[in-house]
Image (spheres, coloured by chain):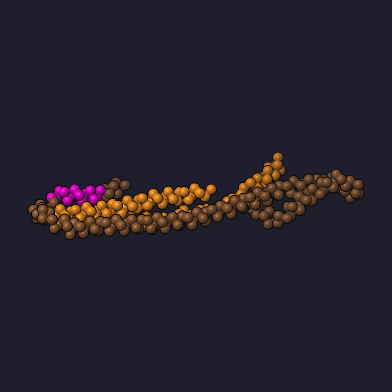
Chain colours: A orange, B brown
Amino acid sequence: MKYLCVFLTALLVGCSTPVPIKPSFPEAPQVLKEKCENLKKIEGDKVAITEMLKVVIHNYTLYYECSTKVEGWQEWYDSQKKIYESVK
Amino acid sequence: MSQITWMLSLIPDWFWTLVLISGIVGTLATWVLKFIPFVSTYRLPIQVASIIALIVGVYFQGAIANETKWQNKIADLQKKVAEAEDKSKETNVVVQEKIVTKTKVIKEKGKTQIEYVDRVITQDKEVVKYIEQCPVPKAIIDAHNAAAEMNKAAEVKK
């Protein structure tokens, strides 16, 4: 019986073939890794409405810059997923 | 077990072909060439050795074919992975360029809007009158600033 076990083990050696391939995790573009800036606050107690308006415009700009980055992440993820799935 | 596999891999492929051929020849010889004195004397040992050689030879021919198939698959996969990595880098460049361009346009638009406020809105007579007479109440400024910093409250809660 033990000779049979040794023989079967020897036969099964041929079936264990390790595949030495490891795709590396894709590196994201540097611009996507930059953090979004904090929104600007209104400084001072007596502030003109136009100054407040300028801060609001500045904050809208920051929002759109940040949303562009989020869209970039989504596009990057979708593209990388397609590329990863093509390797099969 | 990997040591045994490694040791077997040192033996060249032609050796297993030779084992298989000698197994076939030996088996046939014990059946066909019975009239030769040497073969007829050692018929059983030759037959046993030939059958063992036949089995081992067939097994290793299968193993070699299997190994070749896997090596081809590995080479194919390595090629695909290398192509995918190139594509990934190209995609990164495209995404990066798109974001840089969009951000530049957004920044320019924001700057233009602020310049417009400075140049046109603040020159408007009605607005000037409003600026002089009605500064924004502190409560509104505080509410705006609190809203601008609501992300900090979320960070503390983490």
B29 or B97: nearer the viewer? B97
> Can you give x and y, in whole percent of width and height, for residue B27 in the image?
82, 46
Q: Residue at x 81, y 49 (%)?
A: B25
Residue A60 visible at all? yes
Q: Residue at x 70, y 40 (%)?
A: A1
In this picture, residue B30 sits left or right of residue B108:
right
Q: How many marks?
A: 0
Q: Residue B143: say if magenta.
A: yes
> Can you give x and y, in whole percent of width and height, for residue B121 in the image?
16, 55
Q: Which residue is drawn at 40% across and 50% down?
A: A75
In this picture, residue B105 sits left or right of residue B29:
left
> Can you give x and y, in whole percent of width and height, for residue A73 in the image?
38, 51
**Magenta stretch mostly in which secondary structure?**
helix
A18 or A59: nearer the viewer? A59
> Can you give x and y, in whole percent of width and height, for residue A30 in the image?
38, 58
Say above or below: A15 vs B92. Answer: above
Q: Which residue is drawn at 56% across and 52% down?
A: B77
B101 or A13: nearer the viewer? B101
Q: Quadrant of residue A12?
A: top right
Residue A40 visible at all? no
In this picture, residue A19 sits left or right of residue B32:
left
In this picture, residue B6 sits left or right of residue B154:
right
Q: Residue B73: say if magenta.
A: no
Residue at the limit of the structure toward the top, as seen here: A1
Q: Which residues, given as a range, are shown in magenta?
A: B137-150
